[in-house]
Amino acid sequence: MRVFKGFNQSGKDVCPVCGTNDDKETVLVAIDGTQEGNNCQAIQVHLDCIELNYDPETGIIYQLIR
């Protein structure tokens, strides 16, 4: 996963977890179902907002967004 030093604040995008566009370390998360070849659409998410969980029975890594 590539980490960017800041949040791209040029649009109206906000982090889907915290709802802000604070200028903090950010990663791009692929949007399911948008892949065409090796490209896909993505959303910005603050790195410190990510709290992943792993289910060993299904092999799925996930995050609940409350």
Image (cartoon, grey):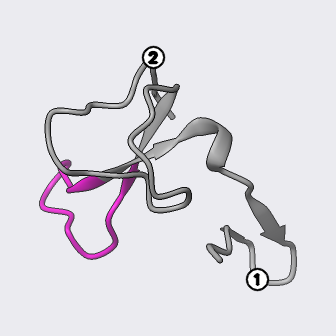
| Horizontal side of residue 26 vs 59, given as left or right | left
Label 2 secondary element = loop
Q: Residue furthest bottom?
A: 57
Residue 65 figure quarter: bottom right
Residue denoted by label 2: 5
Instruction: Tell me the tag on residue 42.
Output: none
Residue denoted by label 1: 58
Q: Residue furthest top?
A: 5
Give the residues drawn in magenta, as a range: 29-42
CA distance separating discs 2 and 1: 33 Å
Q: Which amino acid does the dot numbered 2 rest on?
A: Lys
Q: Is residue 11 magenta?
A: no
Q: Is residue 38 magenta?
A: yes
Name the residue at 43% across, 52% down.
Answer: 15
Q: Residue furthest right?
A: 56
Residue 64 spot, x, y in % from top left: 68, 75
Residue 13 spot, x, y in % from top left: 26, 51
- Residue 17's place in the image compared with 39, above or below, is below
Instruction: Name the one closer to the observer, 30 or 13.
Output: 13
Quadrant of image for the C terminus: bottom right
Label 1 secondary element = loop
Name the residue at 65% across, 50% down.
Answer: 50
Name the residue at 64% across, 48% down.
Answer: 49
Q: Depth-wise, is mark 2 or mark 1 nearer the camera?
A: 2
| Horizontal side of residue 32 vs 4, given as left or right | left
Name the residue at 27% across, 31% down.
Answer: 8
First along the sequence among labels 2 and 1: 2
| Horizontal side of residue 23 vs 36, given as left or right | right
- Residue 66's place in the image compared with 21, above or below, is below
